[in-house]
Amino acid sequence: MDSDEFIFAAVWPRELSRLRRELRSARGDANRALVDRAVAMYELYFQARSSAARSDPVRAYAAPWATALERAAHWVAGWRPNALIHVLYSESSLRLQSQLPNLLLGVHSGDLGDLSSEQLGRIDGLQRRTMREEVEIGAEMAAVQEGLAEPFPRSDAELEGKVGELRRVMERADELRLRTLREVVGILQPVQAVDLLVAAADLEIGLREFGLWLDRSRVGAQGRAW
């Protein structure tokens, strides 16, 4: 296992699980400092991704450290930025349904089921901007893929240029992912941000654990076939 694979397959899942535990245990005393520490951890993760993309863009895009299920869910080698906002809306809707009687009586929880109209307006604006940029990045990625599919023979310089374009598109996608995270938690109150970060971690950890189970099942089935 090389250093990149160790970071993304071993270190990051472990640190994400640790972060989830910390957020859950500190939720009752959630403050902006706690949220900032969580965002700082994601920043370190994306710095590692950027380093991997610079050293070997093609391998970073293929993400051999991810499970087959995780790769199937990838958008430009990672989660789609707008997915975080979908998680927010989903979690908010679930909480709102359970808290609606109290809200009608004027009792507010202050969590994701209790978003203000001002917050909802800002989140909607962020989602629209994020979706527009996703379309732009998707078009850039399509252009790179079309360029790589052009018939050979091709010069080394041409191929290196396409690989460089792939790296730039991946970096732009990661910048959007991190910027979306920062802006979303900036709109939310600390308790709301903690609930969102926990829900997002639940999704990422769950997807990886189920993906690992599927990969092991597939290997076991192949072994029995032999």
Image (tube, helix red, strand yellow):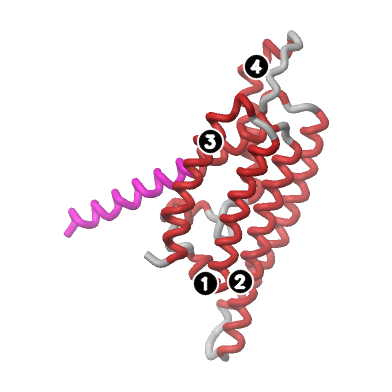
Q: Which mark is residue 99?
A: 4
Q: Mark 3 and mark 2 in contact (Cβ < 8 Å)?
A: no
Report how far apart the C-alphas of labels 4 and 1 lie in the structure.
47 Å
Q: Which amino acid type corresponds to the residue marked 4 in the rendered image?
A: Gln
Q: Position of residue 224 (x, y in %)?
A: 18, 53
Q: Position of residue 159 (x, y in %)?
A: 57, 83
SS at badge 4: helix
Q: Nearer the viewer, mark 2 or mark 3?
A: 3
Q: Which amino acid type corresponds to the residue marked 2 in the rendered image?
A: Leu
Q: Mark 4 and mark 3 in contact (Cβ < 8 Å)?
A: no
Specify whether residue 165 is painted magenta: no
Q: Which amino acid type corresponds to the residue marked 3 in the rendered image?
A: Glu
Query: Which quadrant of the figure has residue 55?
Result: bottom right
Report how far apart the C-alphas of labels 3 and 4 lie in the structure.
25 Å
Q: Which amino acid type corresponds to the residue marked 1 in the rendered image?
A: Val
Report how far apart the C-alphas of labels 2 and 1 lie in the structure.
8 Å
Which residue is labeled 3 in the image?
22
Q: Earlier in the sequence, mark 4 or mark 1?
A: 1
Residue at left 55%, top 84%?
Answer: 151
The magenta span reads 205-226
Residue at left 56%, top 77%?
Answer: 149
Q: Which mark is residue 58?
A: 1
Which residue is labeled 2 in the image?
166
Relative to 219, is 205 on the left or the right?
A: right
Q: Earlier in the sequence, mark 3 or mark 4?
A: 3
Q: Position of residue 200 (x, y in %)?
A: 57, 40
SS at badge 2: helix
Q: Mark 1 and mark 2 in contact (Cβ < 8 Å)?
A: yes
Residue at left 43%, top 62%?
Answer: 5
